[in-house]
Amino acid sequence: MYDLVIKNGTIIDGSGDDGYVSDIAISGGRIVCISKSLDGKKIIDASGLTVTPGFIDSHSHADNAMTDYPDMIEKIEQGITTSVAGQCGISQTPIRVGDAYKTFADTVNEVKDIPMGANIMSFVGHGTIRQAVMGFDNRKPTDGEMAQMELLLRNAMESGAVGLSFGLIYSPGCYADTSELTALARIVKEYNGVISAHLRSEAFELEEAVEEFLDVTKATGARAVLSHHKAMYKANWGKVKNTLKMVDKAISEGYEVYCDVYPYTASHTTLISTVIPPKRRALDNDGIVELLNDKEMRKIIKEEYSSVYGDDLSYISISQAANHPEYEGRNICEIAKENGEDPFDTAFNIIQECRADVHVLKFVMCEDDVEAVIKHPRAMICTDSSVAKGNAAYHPRQRGSFPRALGRYVRKKGVVPLAEMIRKCTSMPASVYGLKSKGLLKEGYDADICIFNAERIIDRADYSDSTKRCEGLDYVILGGEAVAKNAVYTGLKKGGFIKKEA
């Protein structure tokens, strides 16, 4: 008799095909039979419900929670059974320790036996590699430094990294030129890995930034993912239609190019990367805090920012501020008015008071662009988030991306059909990232499964309360066992770190 049978559900298997009613039998953590009239030791009656593969978060930062917050609660409670982390050029290792390095392989050994609430795999970050070798120097690497970066990258790829992520808006990754990116991407291609990129610009130079990344892709032949694709600030709205055409052209030429997208019009990033231009970030956080003691430098930074973006900071709200929870959930301009300050001085003061550990919401995208990216056949759904890690405020995408995609962009808006959205959440990322036994409901595949009411599923987390659980998600099953019921984590840790298969 089977360990578990899910009976009478409408199976949408992740392939993009329409659903059909059948039973799914699970034993030993795998799907062993899909047929009607099956029986098992445990039964889940899925009559009237939709049964899909577990969701795969194609762009996550949950690698920073593996040791201290392994439950991955905010992942599991929205149906995510596997996350692809280490994005935007930022990974946990390699880091410089004296005259040696703690490598990606060391991280894998550290976490490989930690039970987790959900599965996780990880890129190695280009910015992290560069910082380990060169610090925050704004220059080309020497031949010796380049060789060391290549060595650390090979260590990561041979240790199970899914590929190399670029964070070309963050220091020190932003100091790399295209030739450096290309040389490293060639190594990733040797290992059949993936390159992803937070582009050098998602605003006024978006098209040029996409062109640069596509040039790297074409020069190396590596499978490529444009991270959280969007156009920021009103003057740039609509540009994604052009950049998606650029992606289509590269695909028509035979290159493997994808993108991911979170279904929201606000981004989430650091206050430093928002108000301080890249050329002023050739310092670590302590150095930036010290830099802002100089009143003349504050004036220069404000002028540099305003010359590009204008002097309106009303689109910025604080989501997390170390040691200053009273700032969280508040708009920069409101805080400035209350303090009788210029908004830029308020931003600079908050950076200093919080020792640069400040994250913000930026309300700078438009709904038409979000829908355009979601519709693209190579677009995958993501959270671009870690887990809460004890924080009470964060971007609602951390809890709501996948239920929002299903409830708002399928059922309410009809942007794409349900079966296509499930493909974007399951088999497409599984294929891109080499998860050979996940992403489809097929015999022999892992029993990572979501069961939900397609007429009810919806996100409830919002910008005023990001902690609300979704509705309509009945079960999340990982490795054949229920790890969430009615969107509440059961406490079972059936996941762990996944090394990319060779």
Image: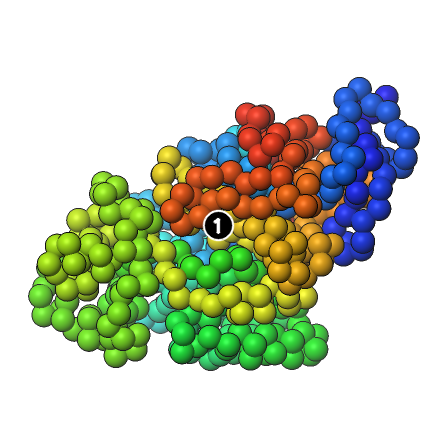
Looking at the image, is 273 positioned above or below residue 4? Answer: below
Query: In the image, what residue occupies the spot 27% across and 65% down?
Result: 313
Query: In the image, what residue occupies the spot 44% across and 39% down?
Result: 467
* x and y, in percent, of residue 298 in the image: 14, 67
Q: Relative to the observer, which residue lies in front, 58 or 340?
A: 340
Q: Quadrant of residue 275?
A: bottom left
Q: Relative to the observer, which residue lies in front, 482 or 165?
A: 482
* x and y, in percent, of residue 372 in the image: 59, 69
Q: Quadrant of residue 283?
A: bottom left
Looking at the image, is 333 positioned above or below residue 494? Answer: below
Query: In the image, what residue occupies the spot 64% across and 43% down?
Result: 456
Q: Relative to the observer, which residue lies in front, 86 or 391?
A: 391
Q: Quadrant of residue 492?
A: top right
Residue 115 visible within the image: yes
Query: In the image, what residue occupies the spot 55% across and 25% down?
Result: 491
* x and y, in percent, of residue 19 in the image: 81, 49
Residue 224 visible within the image: no
Residue corresponding to mark 1: 397
Would you say 41 lies left or right of 430 here?
A: right
Kindly state the secondary structure of the residue where label 1 is placed: helix
Would you say 350 lies left or right of 94 here?
A: left
Which class describes the residues within 10 Å of circle 1: few (<14), some (14-19), or many (20+)?
many
Would you say 20 lies left or right of 94 here?
A: right
